[in-house]
Image (cartoon, rainbow, N blue to C red):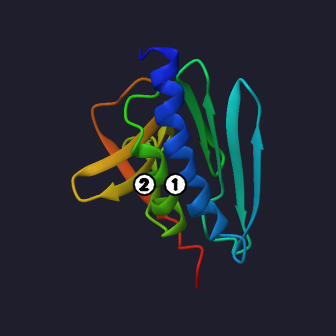
Amino acid sequence: MLPDDVFRDRLEHTLQDVEAAVAKMVDFAAVDVSVSQRYWRVVVLPFFAAACPFDLMIRADQKYSLKLANETFEDRPVERFELFPRLVRAIEAGQVEKISKLDAMTDALVAIEMRVSLEPGWNWHGERRLAAATPSEEWRTHRYLPYRR
């Protein structure tokens, strides 16, 4: 963890980039930014149903939570500040995939993974396991569309 003053300084610069990115979305999405001493949060609901809505909260305790569509990933450590502006721009650009992982034998859902392609070689991903991994899984991918059509 970073000292609080270093974290706040880096976060302030990062949030300027993120706020500039979400400000450009107002013609294509409902955007709500809220701020307190304990967190900074943005909720973006695109007007186009096939685009991925998201909710990003960055907290003063150096953790963040992200909700992509209906999948929530909480209490992740803030490790790279450049993640946040790139994440916002990638979601807006439709670089989001929902991967449903099914047991190949029973077709039962065993996990859901959300993946955001930030740039070549750098992806953000989160996975929610519903059951233990199986020897053979089938993956079905749903790709979200860009906000701007």
N-term mark: 2 or 1: 1
Residue 27 visible within the image: yes
Left or right of residue 52: residue 7 = left
Read off the residue under disc 2: 86
Percent x, y of residue 123 = 33, 49
Left or right of residue 35: residue 69 = left
**Dividing the picture into quarters, in which one does residue 81 lie?**
top left
**Dividing the picture into quarters, in which one does residue 26 lie?**
bottom right
User: Which quadrant holds the N terminus?
Assistant: top left
Q: Amino acid at mark 2?
A: Arg
Q: CA distance from mark 2 to mark 1?
A: 9 Å
Left or right of residue 117: residue 37 = right
Mark 1 secondary-structure assignment? helix
Mark 2 secondary-structure assignment? helix
**Dividing the picture into quarters, in which one does residue 103 lie?**
top left
Residue 17 badge: 1
> Which residue is at the far bottom?
149
Mark 2 or 1: in front is: 1
Q: Is residue 49 above or below residue 135?
A: below
Q: Amino acid at mark 1?
A: Asp
Mark 1 is surrounded, within 10 Å at the Cα level, by few (under 14), some (14 to 19) or many (20 or more) other residues, namely: some
Percent x, y of residue 52 = 60, 61
Residue 74 visible within the image: no
Q: Looking at this view, is 52 or 118 the one in front?
A: 118
Q: Is residue 142 above or below residue 27?
A: above
**Cβ atoms at labels 2 and 1 below 8 Å apart:** no
* Residue plotted at (23% across, 59% down): 120
